[in-house]
Image (cartoon, rainbow, N blue to C red):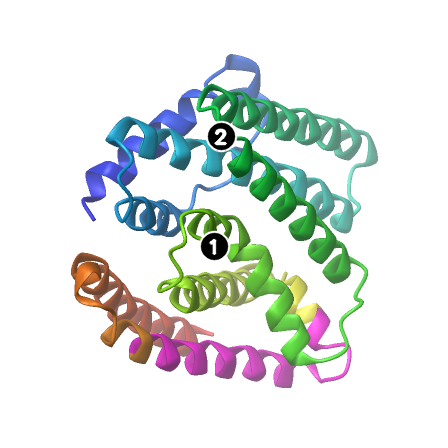
Amino acid sequence: MNSNYTTLIKNKLNEYSNHPFLNKYFDVPEISSDKIVFLKTILDQTELTEPKKENYILATMLIQTALDAHELVTNELDKKINITKNKRQKQLNILVGDLYSGLFYEMLAQLHDIQMINVLAGAIKEINERKMTLYHNDVHSINQLLEEIKRIESLLVTSVSEVFHISSLREIIENWLLMKKLMREQYHYYQKKESRIITLLSEHNEPSHAIRMLENMISRISHTLESYITHLPVQYVELKKVLLEDLRQLAKEQELLLEEG
């Protein structure tokens, strides 16, 4: 996957939020390069034209940004600081999330793809339900916790793959995005002592044990991914190369983080 393509998609997505008011008051959620790469790899297995592939990727990443913007509302409420500012930021995040949602539906409507609209609408509903499960701490086991996070992180991408009947990447997509989410949570905890996942794990464990549990989860998923990636079919040779390189780099970063932590 050419990194220039990922940059191109990110730049086009950023154009949608390039407004003086938004630039001043709203932090656009980070756009996942991984999800762009997975989406492009999936769509490259179809006979779609390049412009259509790009529009499907943009539409999917727009709704991802909408979901991430709405999630910022929950995160800010958790902090419970500066009530007036918090309320204003909450309203802005909701409005921006709705803006991205509207752009998503407009783009897919132009593609005349009712099936994709219905599939992604179903995915959005499930993602929000699973987020509420985590928000209300309605998790009863580590396996359930991992499953909720895995589905939240990967469902939009895997839903696109299901529409085009491409299932060979599902395990890699789910586990890769789960691993990256756990790594981000680990980093936030070490840097800011903030992590919803650590908080959930600490419900029944000492915080130090919860951190070790998170580290072990990341290590286990990483080893599983290495096996999955190594055995990818030949048509995914470029993806295989990219993911194995990224996995090695992430392992180095993980080692440094643990040494500093």
Q: Which residues are magenta?
A: 200-226
Left/right placement of residue 97 relative to residue 174 reads right
Q: Where's residue 211, x and y in %?
A: 58, 78
Q: Where's residue 164, x and y in %?
A: 40, 48
Circle 2 crowding by C-alpha within 10 Å: few under 14, some 14–19, many from 20: few
Q: Nearer the viewer, residue 184 or 122?
A: 122
Q: Where's residue 49, x and y in %?
A: 26, 31
> 152 above or below 142?
above
> What type is the residue that disc 1 sits on?
Thr
Of marks 2 and 1, which one's residue comes earlier in the chain? 2
Residue at the location (47% across, 19% down)? 110
Residue 23 within the magenta-colored segment of the rendering:
no
Give the residue number, with chain letter if any, for mark 2: 113
Determine the image quadrant of residue 133.
bottom right
Left/right placement of residue 76 relative to residue 83 reads left
- Disc marking residue 158: 1
Residue at the location (30% across, 77% down)? 226
Task: Look at the magenta stretch and give its main secondary structure.
Answer: helix
Residue at the location (32% across, 75% down)? 228
Circle 1 crowding by C-alpha within 10 Å: few under 14, some 14–19, many from 20: many
Q: What count of labels does the image hold?
A: 2
Q: Nearer the viewer, residue 183 or 227?
A: 227
Cα separation, mark 2 vs mark 1, equals 17 Å
Determine whether the residue tagged by mark 2 lies in a helix, strand or loop: loop
Determine whether the residue tagged by mark 1 lies in a helix, strand or loop: helix
